[in-house]
Every structure is written in structure tokens, then in C-alpha cells.
Image (cartoon, rainbow, N blue to C red):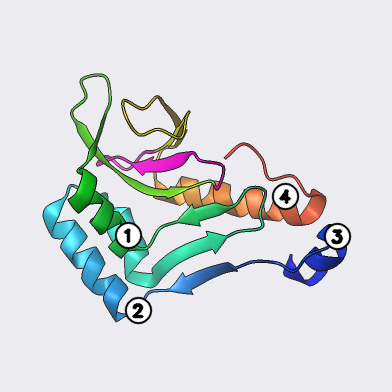
Amino acid sequence: MTGEFERRHGFPPGTNEVRPADHDDHAAARTLAQVSLIPADLVTFYDSIGDVTWEDVCNGYFIDPAGDVLLRLQEYGVLDVGADQRDHSLVIGSNGGGLSYVACPGGAVYRTRTASLDDPELDKVADDLRQFLELLERSLTRFVADGESGYL
């Protein structure tokens, strides 16, 4: 993707990487798992992956480092979603266009409809983190092929 980026767009690519987890990421993930109802697959993810930054895929796709998720949890608390507002969920990333990705304790991943996290309206984008990551991969593949990224 980045090899042809500058020729296609007229400016150099930004950061586009999947960064491996380091010691600080592992520590933040362990703390996050102790203080919140975090889906098991997200704990496993953070054991290997520090963060995902794809600045140049459409508006961008970002999965935040565990430390950022933990800091947001400490500063703002959980995001209450679901019909009874009892699913205490975590904002784990964004699409670069102002919409956030939210992981629920049961594993489902949602996307906000607006940039505001105050009383958010959410759309389910994946049943679990694995499906969400597969959708991200498809978005990247499509973007490389034809410049479009899909609906995430």
C-alpha cells in the first residue's frame, strides 16, 4: 500500500503499522483485565499487539494501545450500552473520521454513529474481536486494490 501511495496521492504516507506489544503494553493489558469486564479475546489481542495505526486507509483505522484504553477508562469510566444500559463497554479505537469502536464484555464490537460518546447511538459491526479484525483486514485489502475501504 505505501509503495504506491505517494505517486497516487501526491504526498508521503503516514504511519501504517501493526505494532507488536511491548512490556508497557503487557502491563496495561493486565491492569485493564483486573479493573474492567474486558472480553477475553481483547486480552489475548493486547498480549501480542500493541496497537494498530493505519493512517492512510480511507480516513484511517486505529485500535488504541491498552494503556490508552486504560487511561480513558480511568478518566471517563465505561460506556454504558445495550437495551438496559448495563453493558459496561470500552472504547478501543476509531475510524479516523470521528467514530469510535466499542468492545462489549460479551465480545461484540460496535461503532458509534456520531463523534460524541455522550449517550451514543451504536451499530454492531462484529460479533467478536476476531470478526472485527477480519473486517479490518478486508478493508485494507480492498483499499489497496481499488482505493475504497468498505463500511467500517
- Name the image quarter holding the N terminus: bottom right
Q: Nearer the viewer, residue 113 or 140?
A: 113
Q: Residue at x 78, y 72 (%)?
A: 3
Q: Amino acid at mark 2?
A: Asp
Q: Which circle's residue, 1 or 4, is located before the other in the chain?
A: 1
Q: Is 99 part of what is drawn in magenta?
A: yes
Q: Which circle's residue, 2 or 4, is located before the other in the chain?
A: 2
The stretch in magenta equals 96-109
The dot on residue 22 is 2
Q: Which circle's residue, 3 or 2, is located before the other in the chain?
A: 3
x, y percentage for residue 104?
29, 40
Disc number lying in front (1 or 2): 1
Q: Is 63 positioned to the left or the right of 28 in the image?
A: right
Looking at the image, do the residues carrying marks 3 and 2 touch, with CB atoms under 8 Å apart? no
x, y percentage for residue 144?
75, 57
In space, the residues marked 1 and 2 are separated at their CA atoms by 14 Å
x, y percentage for residue 13?
70, 67
Q: Nearer the viewer, residue 93 or 109?
A: 93
Residue indicated by mark 1: 68
Q: Amino acid at mark 1?
A: Asp
Q: Amino acid at mark 3?
A: Arg
Q: Which circle's residue, 3 or 1, is located before the other in the chain?
A: 3
In space, the residues marked 4 and 3 are separated at their CA atoms by 16 Å
In space, the residues marked 3 and 1 are separated at their CA atoms by 33 Å
For numbered disc 2, what is the local secondary structure?
loop
Q: Is 115 positioned to the left or the right of 39 in the image?
A: right
Dot 4: few (<14), some (14–19), or many (≥20) neighbours within 10 Å? some
Disc number lying in front (3 or 2): 3
Disc number lying in front (2 or 4): 2
